[in-house]
Image (spheres, rainbow, N blue to C red):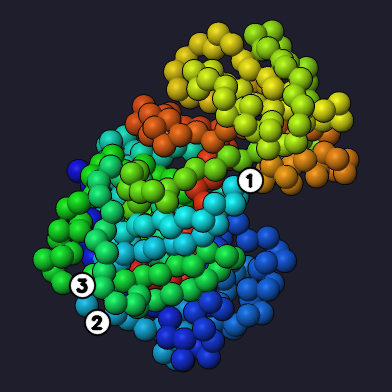
Amino acid sequence: MAELKPFRALRYDPAAAGAPLDQLVAPPYDVIPDEVLQSLAAASEFNIVRLIRPHEPELAAERFADWQARGVLVREERPAVWRLEEEFVGPDGVRRTRVGLVARVRVHPFDEGVVFPHERTFEGPMQMRLRLIRGLRTKVSPVLMLHAGASPPVMPGPPQLEATLGGSTSRLWRIDDPALVAETIAAVRGPLVIADGHHRYTASLKHFQEQGTEETAFTMATLVSREDPGLEIFPTHRLVSVDPPPLPGGFTEAQLEGDVHACLDRLASAGRDHPAFVRLDGDGAVLAEERDVEGGTLERLDVSSLDRLGLEGVGYTAFADEAVRAVESGDVRAAFLVRAPTIEQVEDVATSGLVMPQKSTYFYPKLTTGLLLAPLDE
């Protein structure tokens, strides 16, 4: 069973920082292009991006100590878990609110069957996150996890923390009554599946294996119920700058008419028992369906079918309209529109001990970094 604990969060004091919380938070480190990095750093000398994206993690440690000494980052007096509400408009134009519970979660090797990954990790990004944990001795960015239990309770009054970043508004309510903390934690049910933050989790696990202490045995996570109405997986479409190979045998192809939304509607109607995707190129749009696929859930995903094609020069976008513009402008040779895996498919692949191809899922929005930090001294 997963073990969750409250924690005494470290958080910003906007008055001491001289800026609203909106100007102090940032997206996760792995989705910050250079132009956004520069704008975040310019927003405030205390923006969290200066900790999560330094040239050297050791420099982040110096800044981190200075910010605490100056009262920019302050410590909560009592341990708590937090109800997080994220209000956003997704890539599909629909407004949603996703609800999660922020808590410390004990880390486990994946083969113990407590926490499951669904995507591959890479050594380079993991090592950078590990160096940051060693230097700061604090978990700065939460891992997004899915669970099978209930969402945290609605809390009265206004939130203790609120920030808007990139069109997504995060609101946090503190839950620090010991009885309610215990009740809220008990509502979380396994399995725990990592939705986003695989490198952060793996780095936390590696750090614990190095140190072997109770203080390093936990990572900070936002846990979202798989039944939460605001939980949605969006597709990550493929943009190909090199001419794709012709489809091998086993595929059927049907020419499509209409705009990209009509193409997506046709794709959505294809059966989930086999892979399908829409190929856009200079000749128009084609619905391709791969028939007679051998294997289980993983092999039947749209992204797995594309992975088997061996595409080269692949880029990614969550927005179908952007894929169309890239093809029409000649920036790419072709685009492949896919369906996102369902929650059930993600869990089936993960709990089977398998992993999906890179960029198989897009859990939107990405969790905002800098709302809460979890020092490793509890």
Work out whether residue 51 can be spotted: no
Residue that label 2 marks: 77
Which of 251 and 41 lies nearest the eye of the viewer?
Answer: 251
Element type at marker 3?
A: loop
Q: In this view, does 269 lie above or below 230?
A: above
* Mark 1, secondary structure of its residue: loop
Residue type at the position of mark 3: Asp
Q: Is residue 341 above or below residue 209?
A: above
Q: Quadrant of residue 78?
A: bottom left
> Residue 176 has which mark?
3
Residue drawn at (74%, 42%) of the image: 323
Label located before the other in sequence (3 or 2): 2
Residue 366 in percent (x, y) is at 51, 56
- Identify residue type, mark 1: Ala
Residue 318's disc number? 1
- Residue at point 54% right, 81% down? 46
Residue type, label 2: Glu
**Residue shown at the point (26%, 58%) measured from the top left:** 152
* x and y, in percent, of residue 174 in the image: 28, 72
Q: Residues within 10 Å of mark 2 (few under 14, many from 20)?
A: few
